[in-house]
């Protein structure tokens, strides 16, 4: 682009787009930082904790089924657990 074709409108459009891209990059950086901090605090990812929880509930239900014929064992219900 030669200097003769340069105008203020082109400059303002370029400047606005540049500002928009900087804002998007900052938003992305902050989101990544929040994800990293969340993982560092818990030590274990939420995905792994969810997997462990599901397997513990399944194990508890299996134990409950095995003890159904024992009338002295209290009946446990997992319906109070919110997913």
Image (spheres, rainbow, N blue to C red):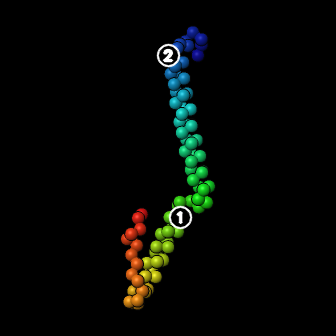
Q: In the depicted view, which residue is nearer to us: 24 or 60?
A: 60
Q: Give the residue at the far top of this rendering.
A: 4
Q: Is residue 71 left or right of residue 52?
A: left
Residue at x 47%, y 69% (from the top left corner): 54
> Residue 42 falls in which quadrant of the image?
bottom right
Mark earlier in primary sequence (2, 1):
2
Q: Residues within 10 Å of mark 2 (few under 14, many from 20)?
A: few
Residue 5, image x, y percentages: 55, 12
- In the rendered structure, find residue 70 and report the number of the disc placed on it: none
Residue 74 on image: x %, y %: 40, 83
Which quarter of the picture shows residue 41? bottom right
Determine the secondary structure under disc 2: helix
Q: Is residue 47 above or below residue 29?
A: below
Q: Nearer the viewer, mark 2 or mark 1?
A: 1
Q: CA distance from mark 2 to mark 1?
A: 54 Å
Q: Residue at x 58, y 16 (%)?
A: 1
Q: Are marks 2 and 1 in contact (CB under 8 Å)?
A: no
Residue 36 lies, in percent from the top left, at: 60, 51
Determine whether the residue tagged by mark 1 lies in a helix, strand or loop. Answer: helix
Image point (50%, 64%), residue name? 50
Taking the image as shown, residue 35 lies to the left or right of residue 73, namely right
Q: Which mark is residue 49?
A: 1
Seen at 50% across and 16% down, the residue is 9
The residue labelled by disc 2 is 9
Q: Please say if 9 is above or below 61.
A: above
**In which quadrant will I find the C terminus?**
bottom left
Numbered disc total: 2
Q: With respect to residue 28, does 39 lie above or below?
A: below
* Of 4 and 56, the residue lying toward us: 56
Percent from the top left, x then y, of residue 61? 43, 78
Q: Residues within 10 Å of mark 1 (few under 14, many from 20)?
A: few
């Amino acid at each position: 682009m030669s200097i003769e074709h340069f105008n203020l409108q082109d400059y303002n459009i370029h400047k606005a787009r540049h500002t928009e891209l900087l804002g998007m990059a900052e938003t992305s950086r902050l989101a990544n930082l929040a994800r990293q901090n969340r993982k560092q605090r818990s030590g274990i990812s939420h995905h792994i904790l969810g997997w462990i929880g599901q397997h513990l509930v399944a194990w508890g239900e299996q134990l409950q089924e095995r003890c159904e014929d024992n009338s002295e064992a209290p009946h446990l219900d997992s319906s109070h657990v919110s997913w």
